[in-house]
Image (tube, helix red, strand yellow):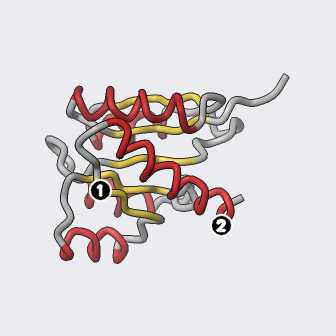
Amino acid sequence: MSIREIVVQAEDDDDHAELLELAWEDLSPDAELVRVRDGASLLDYLTGLDPNRERPILILLDLKMPGMNGFDVLQALKGGVETRRIPVVVLSSSSADRDVKRAYDEHANGYVIKAGNQHDFVKVLMRFWGRFNVLAF
């Protein structure tokens, strides 16, 4: 029995989450995409995992969420013993240099600006995913 790869997306916007789900089906149909709606839920999800099972292979993190924002979540993830090695890619509608810089300063493994339509979004994710796979695995 093989272990299915898990990717977790933290996204509060239903439209963006649906776009990502559609894009992910094209990009990596063998990986399970789990959605949580905010930063606290992401941390709860990760805390609730069986420590003897495999961790998610990737976290896709929105920056602008209610409660804990993505920067706070990124700090918590990269500061945690059990979570610091999980790659985190920020998916944000913000192209502001200060947001990109801060995400990398907080040790994000990548930053992808959300595109307005599925086709463009899939293209951006495919380019990134190809580079990520080569670099990370």
User: What x and y, as percent, mark residue 38?
Assistant: 26, 37
User: What x and y, as percent, mark residue 4?
Assistant: 69, 29
Q: Earlier in the sequence, mark 1 or mark 2?
A: 1
Residue at x-position 54% and y-position 60%: 81
The numbered mark at residue 135 is: 2
Q: Residue furthest right?
A: 1
Marks 1 and 2, how far apart at CA: 20 Å
The relative height of residue 69 versus residue 71 in the rendered view (above or below) is above
Crowd band around label 2 with a 10 angstrom C-alpha radius: few (<14), some (14–19), many (20+): few
Question: What is the quadrant of residue 100 in the picture?
Answer: bottom left
The quadrant in which the N terminus is found is top right
Q: Residue furthest front?
A: 119
The quadrant in which the C terminus is found is bottom right
Kindly identify the amino acid type of the residue bearing the numbered disc 1.
Ile
User: What x and y, as percent, mark residue 20?
Assistant: 38, 35
The numbered mark at residue 113 is: 1
Kindly identify the amino acid type of the residue bearing the numbered disc 2.
Leu
